[in-house]
Amino acid sequence: MGLWLCDPATRPAVARLRARGKPAGIIACALANRANRIAFAMVRDQVAYDPDRWSS
């Protein structure tokens, strides 16, 4: 939920999901999955979080 509210890089993803008519619970799960993938990539590559890299 923190990503949804605070991270500007996730706002386009939320907007796309809302435009497709997804309910809030599905959006929250999608963002949790996204956060998990980002965290794994950060640990794997040993890099700091860069919002520009993860905006899509």
Image (cartoon, rainbow, N blue to C red):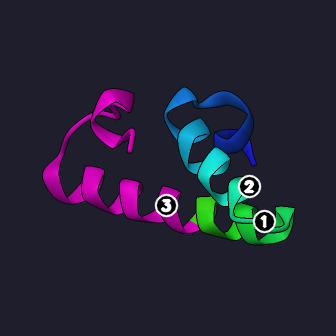
Q: Residue 31: x and y, percent?
A: 61, 59
Q: Amino acid at mark 1?
A: Gly
Q: Which residue is mark 3?
A: 34
What residue do we see at 74% from left, 34% from top?
A: 5
Give the mark nearest the N terminus, 3 or 2: 2
Q: Amino acid at mark 2?
A: Arg
In-front residue for pair 13/34: 13
- Vertical order, 19 against 23 (above or below): above
- Vertical order, 38 against 2 (above or below): below
Q: Which mark is residue 18?
A: 2
- Vertical order, 34 against 48 (above or below): below
Q: Residues within 10 Å of mark 3 (few under 14, many from 20)?
A: some
Q: Which residue is mark 1?
A: 21
Q: Residue 50: x and y, percent?
A: 32, 30
Which residue lies most toward the left here?
45
What residue do we see at 78% from left, 65% from top?
A: 21
Give the mark nearest the N terminus, 1 or 3: 1
Quarter-of-image position of residue 41: bottom left
Q: Could you tell me which secondary element the residue under label 2 belongs to?
A: helix
Q: Residue 49: x and y, percent?
A: 35, 34
**On the picture, is 2 further left or further right than 31?**
right
State how many labels appear: 3
**On the picture, is 51 further left or further right than 5?**
left
Q: Amino acid at mark 3?
A: Arg
Q: Residue 35: x and y, percent?
A: 51, 56
Q: Could you tell me which secondary element the residue under label 1 belongs to?
A: loop
Chain part drawn in magenta: 33-56
